[in-house]
Image (cartoon, coloured by chain):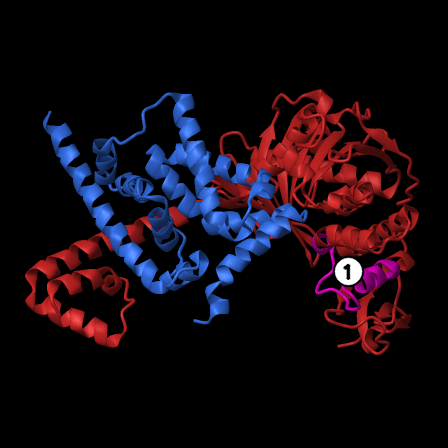
């Protein structure tokens, strides 16, 4: 993959951001389309509920649109959007005065019901808890449909670094998921 | 290969990122190493779970909700704050140009096309009975131009004979239409200017017809005058479908089986014109001040003299010239029609602003463009036209770009790339 291809996604983000700033608000929908799943998954992990995640994701996207002029680096739209999503999630939690839902028992119970949409928020919750750089890679890879090479281009780092970070992310996810399981066992027993 | 080295490569292995030699040595090590084997299985489990969840989330659809909210919020924000918000001030938007109000008026014309035709075998008596009831209600809905959900969205609030309209491609423009007095109030919420436009004659009638069209859809559902399609889940709710076919249009309506109120309407009129209506709300409490025809406080009223009546073939030719010369930089467009016109409008406004002509001249150009397209809309409803100008260069005297058959005429009018026109017998039409 050539350098041009590698940075294609990044350039496309930049293009759409600039189009929006130039008075073509309709082009914002391409950015929505590209990142909605990753943003939603991240927020579901934080909030533990699909409806609340959708509400927060919508708010984050609308907020991003209206604050677009404040985005210093148009090519890092996604990490900026994730940051906005995090703030919205925090505000929602505060507003509703609900403790961050880490009710693993509940989400496992939902999983057991075999609903069509995987409601295994345990995984999303573990992803949401990763350090920023790792979280971004996992979200882009699995929820944004990017290949590792594309991610390397987008984040402007060598492919090897992406793979290494992904390995590290897997290790962290495994650890968190195991802890969750233990908590679950504990909660079921008590 | 030892275990430490192997474990480092396992994620890359699962992700299939390893080149052949590396891949092979990992595979070989795995054969004899139960510890690494169990780890790769665990990683694969996690990988599959990630992929599966990723796919599930990809099915979400926030797009239209987000876009609609942006349009609404933009209007609310601009109304609520005295000056434009900081973020918007810094935007280099085309909407700052003095052409905005012209674009607003022009967009109205384009939309009036929806009202041209609503044949759908109406039963006049029933319609007469039901109309006062329907008239008494408010209707709020979104209209999307095109056949999928990616088109321009118009948000419409109808209260009696007044309409408040916002459009996703011109988010700071609001239009309030008074059908009784055939007047339009265009508001540019960013530069705080207001303009009144007369919509007497054709244009007013057609806008009125457009609202009738919506109401007619409801009454026909109640009458059951359309072919039934059965039940399906539409936009997340149970719906019963009907299709109505007119001479030149096809309308599919999905309605709530309990209340008979439409949930979604998909329409195709003529060759090029399709739209979707959804997010209907009937009879909701709507603030009457939203459709006030008074110029809001803090707005400057602009004087205009816009004549949009009775578009002719000459107007159409002029709009084709504008399309090729200004928008297309010398080439005729891919397609013409209401949808393309709507999409081209902001570009035209922008290009005219860049030409640095006088405001008067700029107004004339935008109005001519819109007026000419009105002529085409009438042809659209009759279906007797053909566009062949895709990629043709302006000035090409040998290539026909458009032809149509005027009402009650035996011959066709054929327009060429140099914008000359000839009368041509049907058998001699371009192939």
What chain is tagged by disc 1? B
Tag count: 1
Magenta span: B317-341
In the image: residue B342, left or right of residue B302:
left
Chain B's shade in the image? red
Magenta stretch contains residue B329? yes
User: Mark 1 highlights which residue?
Assistant: B327
Mark 1, residues whose alpha carbon is within 10 Å: few (<14), some, or many (≥20)? Answer: many
User: From where the camera sits, is residue B374 visible?
Assistant: yes
Q: The chain coloured blue carries which letter? A: A
Choose between A156 and B153: the one closer to the eye.
Answer: A156
Q: Quadrant of the N terminus of chain B?
A: bottom left
User: From where the camera sits, is residue B267 visible?
Assistant: no
Magenta stretch contains residue B333? yes
Quarter occupied by residue B173: top right
Residue at image location 75% in from the left, 66% down from the top: B387
Q: Main secondary structure of the magenta part?
A: helix
Residue at image location 22% in from the left, 50% down from the top: A171
Residue at image location 67% in from the left, 35% down from the top: B156
In the image: residue B94, left or right of residue B60:
right
Residue B303 at x, y percent in the picture: 91, 35
Residue B344 at x, y percent in the picture: 73, 54
Q: Secondary structure at mark 1?
A: helix
Choose between A143 and A117: the one closer to the eye.
Answer: A143
């Amino acid at each position: 993959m050539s350098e041009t291809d590698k940075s294609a996604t990044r350039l496309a983000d930049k293009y759409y951001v600039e189009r929006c700033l130039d008075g073509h608000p309709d082009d914002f929908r391409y950015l929505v389309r590209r990142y909605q799943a990753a943003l939603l998954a991240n927020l579901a992990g934080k909030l533990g509920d699909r409806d609340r995640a959708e509400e927060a994701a919508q708010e984050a996207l609308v907020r991003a649109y209206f604050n677009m002029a404040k985005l210093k680096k148009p090519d890092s739209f996604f990490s900026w959007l994730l940051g906005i999503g995090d703030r919205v999630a925090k505000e929602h939690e505060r507003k509703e005065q609900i403790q961050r839902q880490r009710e693993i028992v509940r989400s496992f119970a939902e999983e057991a019901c075999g609903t069509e949409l995987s409601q295994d928020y345990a995984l999303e919750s573990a992803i949401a808890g990763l350090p920023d750089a790792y979280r971004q890679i996992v979200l882009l890879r699995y929820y944004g449909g990017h290949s590792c090479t594309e991610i390397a281009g987008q984040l402007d780092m060598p492919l090897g670094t992406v793979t290494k970070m992904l390995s590290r992310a897997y290790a962290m996810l495994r650890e968190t998921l195991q802890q969750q399981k233990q908590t679950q066992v504990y909660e079921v027993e008590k | 290969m030892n275990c430490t080295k192997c474990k480092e490569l396992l994620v890359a292995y699962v992700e299939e990122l390893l080149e052949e030699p590396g891949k092979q040595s990992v595979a070989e090590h795995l054969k004899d190493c139960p510890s690494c084997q169990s780890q790769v299985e665990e990683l694969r489990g996690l990988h599959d779970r990630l992929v599966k969840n990723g796919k599930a989330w990809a099915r979400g659809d926030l797009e239209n909700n987000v876009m609609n909210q942006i349009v609404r919020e933009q209007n609310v924000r601009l109304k609520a704050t005295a000056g434009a918000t900081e973020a918007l001030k810094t935007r280099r938007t085309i909407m700052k140009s003095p052409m905005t109000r012209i674009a607003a008026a022009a967009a109205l014309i384009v939309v009036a096309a929806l009202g041209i035709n609503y044949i759908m075998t109406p039963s006049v008596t029933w319609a007469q009975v039901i109309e006062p009831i329907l008239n008494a209600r408010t209707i709020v809905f979104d209209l999307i131009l095109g056949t999928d959900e990616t088109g321009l969205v118009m948000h419409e609030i109808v209260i009696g004979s007044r309409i408040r309209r916002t459009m996703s491609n011109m988010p700071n423009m609001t239009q309030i239409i008074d059908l009784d007095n055939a007047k339009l109030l265009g508001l540019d919420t960013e530069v705080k200017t207001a303009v009144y436009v007369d919509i007497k004659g054709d244009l007013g009638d057609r806008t009125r017809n457009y609202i009738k069209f919506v109401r007619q859809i409801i009454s026909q559902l109640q009458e059951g005058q359309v072919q039934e399609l059965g039940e399906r889940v539409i936009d997340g709710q149970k719906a019963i479908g009907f299709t109505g076919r007119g001479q030149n249009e096809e309308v599919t309506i999905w309605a709530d089986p309990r209340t008979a109120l439409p949930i979604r309407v998909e329409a195709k009129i003529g060759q090029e014109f399709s739209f979707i209506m959804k997010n209907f709300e009937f009879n909701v409490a709507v603030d009457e001040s939203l459709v006030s025809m008074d110029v809001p406080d803090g707005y400057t009223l602009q004087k205009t003299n816009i004549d949009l009546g009775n578009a002719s073939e000459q107007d159409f030719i002029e709009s084709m010239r504008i399309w090729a010369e200004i928008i297309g930089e010398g080439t005729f467009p891919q397609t013409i029609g209401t949808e393309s016109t709507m999409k081209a409008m902001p570009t035209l406004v922008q290009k005219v602003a860049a030409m640095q002509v006088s405001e008067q001249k700029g107004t004339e150009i935008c109005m001519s463009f819109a007026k000419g397209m009105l002529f085409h809309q009438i042809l659209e409803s009759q279906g007797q036209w053909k566009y062949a100008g895709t990629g043709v260069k302006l000035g090409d005297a040998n290539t026909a770009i458009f032809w149509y058959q005027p009402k009650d005429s035996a011959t066709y009018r054929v327009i060429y790339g140099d914008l000359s026109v000839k009368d041509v017998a049907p058998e001699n039409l371009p192939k």
